[in-house]
Amino acid sequence: MELTFEANLLLSALLFTIGILGVMWKRNAISLFMSVELMLNAANLAFVAFAYELGLLSGGILVLFIMTVAAAEAGVGLAIFISLFRGKHHIRVDEHDSLHG
Amino acid sequence: MNPINKEIQDIVAYVPDISLASLAPFLILLLGGIVCLVADAASDKKGSRRILPPIAGVTLIAAIASFFMGLVPSRPFVEGAFYGDFFAQICCIVCLFAGLLMVILAPRLIERRNIPSGEFYTLIIFASLGMCLLAMSNELLTAFISLEIMSLSLYVLTGIDRRSGRAAEAAFKYFILGAFASALLVFGMAFLYGATQTTRLDLMGQVLASGYNTLITGETVAVNPVWIYLGFTLVFAGLCFKLTLAPFHMWAPDVYQGANTPTAMMIATGSKVAAFAFLIHLVTALSFWEPFAGSAAFIIGLVAIVSMIWGNLAALVQKDFKRMMAYSSVAHTGYMMVGVLVIVSLPALLQGDDLATATATVRQAIALYLGGYTIMNVLAFGLAYHLDGESNMEAYRGLFWRNPGAAFGMGIAMFSLVGIGFTPPTIGFMGKFYLFKEGVQYGFTAVVVIAVLASVVSAFYYLGLVTRMFMREPETGDGAVALCGTGAHQCGLFTSASFTRMYLIGAGILIFVLGLLPWLFIGVGQHLASGIAP
């Protein structure tokens, strides 16, 4: 079976939705971050699908940059998780609630 | 031949139009950031605390100067990746000034909280670099990368005080929601790219103006409206997070409260101005598409109204100064959206030269508002930081009797933030006046009326703070804010306290100078853009 443009786009929309649902429901910081990465990869897939369908090169190049940015984001994010973990020895997001008005 | 192979051959044969001189501000900032890192590595802790503030300050001043030297062209440059029109340039300068003021506030923070200085100054410079790139970007990829340069620097700056659990929590919230917002943004960009076959905003405008796509593949294809709507909605939602527009503003109060005050100042001013500049460029491009105006105006207007109302009502009940400022900035971004509404609807009303003139006028009004908003906020945050205190509102009780100067400055900032009725000579009033005038002129009277009513509500909490400072007797005890500049803050060449005073007094004066002579600000911007016309 051939993977058509529509199927690619549908898959990316599906991944994106799973990512959004993950951000909404997951309560562990790492799972939250994985959901965000899933959303970024869904965007990558959409870019590649469009680039291939339209016969353009730019979409594919964009994906390389997005992947690099995602890696940098992971570096910063994990460092922040560690500094959060140092304080309370867990990263369950519900229980970090010291900031309120 | 396969179109992709053909394109590769074209690219190999092509000589790109990249002039390093036009990139001067960015290169200066990049170089300054690297010099900061190297200087930090080469010297000990005390030495780097002494030499880094001057290096960072000079870098930011040099970057501002390079704009005034007219190196940045007011046309698309570097293959259309950037576009330095007057609006973008003025936003860049505002962001760089915010960075400079953060450098002035930094030595004391670093000394007191024992923060690694090399990282701190480098990140300030890189955050400013990201803001400048974002304000000037004319292309989706550049916009995304510069947004991330800015955001990643700010995430780290938020959580850089590692002994503070609240800072870590604030950094975490900012990071997760910021990353979520970027993911929304980039997914939306994929659809805009798919619909218009280009990532450049100016070409996108051309494609959308005709409604047909003949740009690259040569075939005439109708633009798919669903993809444009989907793409714009997602990109707009992503930008709403960065702009703290309701209902995507939930992170702002927590982050402002938990972050150190100089960083909160930078998030409230620089990052917002830059994201706003990109939003303006994006909606300008999309507004050339005829069906866009009505439906986008509905979304933008709704977000604006919700932000004004929600921001002001929530600010009324805050007990913490920085949380109050966070909600106040939600409301202020709501007011700014009036300008976006006008820009979206203009192409449907006017054509040709009239359109160009009207767009320029609206952009001037927005630039004035952004500049005024930044000045008021740097004054308020700077004073809050200078006053040594916790940001608890009760600490400001009777401030006037202990520190008249600081109370007076805060009073000016608060009156200017109210911006209506009895505060005419301030920049806050002038910004609102010009912006709302444009709004009424192009038929958004209802939104403007709501904005004015919301400003009336805002007077309660701004002036509540002023009342606390001026009217009541001083309270002796733990809650009292210590006097300005108590204790010697010796941080080497940049004596933090005296520079901070200069900056605070300068901002206070600027509120009135620009309030009385708003054309000064606009004139600078126009000079920047016109002096180097192609």
Image (tube, rainbow, N blue to C red):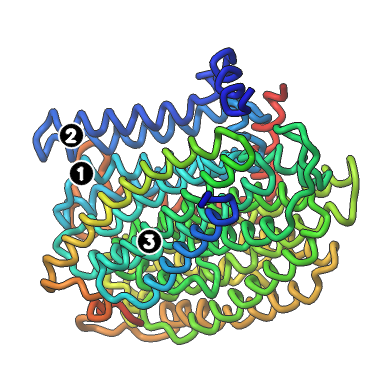
User: Can you say which quadrant of the picture contains the N terminus of chain B?
Assistant: top right
Q: Is residue B398 visible?
A: no
Look at label 1 and name its amino acid.
Ser
**Residue marked by disc 1:** B117
* SS label for mark 2: helix
Crowd around label 3: few <14 · some 14–19 · many ≥20 (10 Å): many
Q: Is residue B34 visible?
A: yes
Q: Rounded to the nearest whole Å, what is the CA distance between mark 2 and mark 3? A: 34 Å
Q: Quadrant of residue B357?
A: top right
Contact, mark 2 vs mark 3 (Cβ under 8 Å): no
* SS label for mark 3: helix
Measured as percent of width and height from the top left, residue B214 is found at 77, 36
Look at label 2 and name its amino acid.
Asp
Subunit under mark 2 = B
In the image, taking residue A13 as reference, residue B88 lies left or right, namely right
* Of residues B149 and B404, the one drawn nearer to the viewer in this rendering: B149
Which of pointers 2 and 1 lies earlier in the amino acid sequence?
Answer: 2
Subunit under mark 1 = B
Residue under the image location 59 percent in, 72 percent down: B418
**Residue marked by disc 3:** A36
Look at label 3 and name its amino acid.
Val
Measured as percent of width and height from the top left, residue B392 is found at 32, 78
**Residue marked by disc 2:** B40
User: Can you say which quadrant of the picture contains the C terminus of chain B?
Assistant: top right
Q: Rounded to the nearest whole Å, what is the CA distance between mark 2 and mark 1? A: 8 Å
Residue under the image location 59 percent in, 48 percent down: B278
Contact, mark 2 vs mark 1 (Cβ under 8 Å): yes
Measured as percent of width and height from the top left, residue B470 is found at 44, 78
Q: Rounded to the nearest whole Å, what is the CA distance between mark 1 and mark 3? A: 31 Å
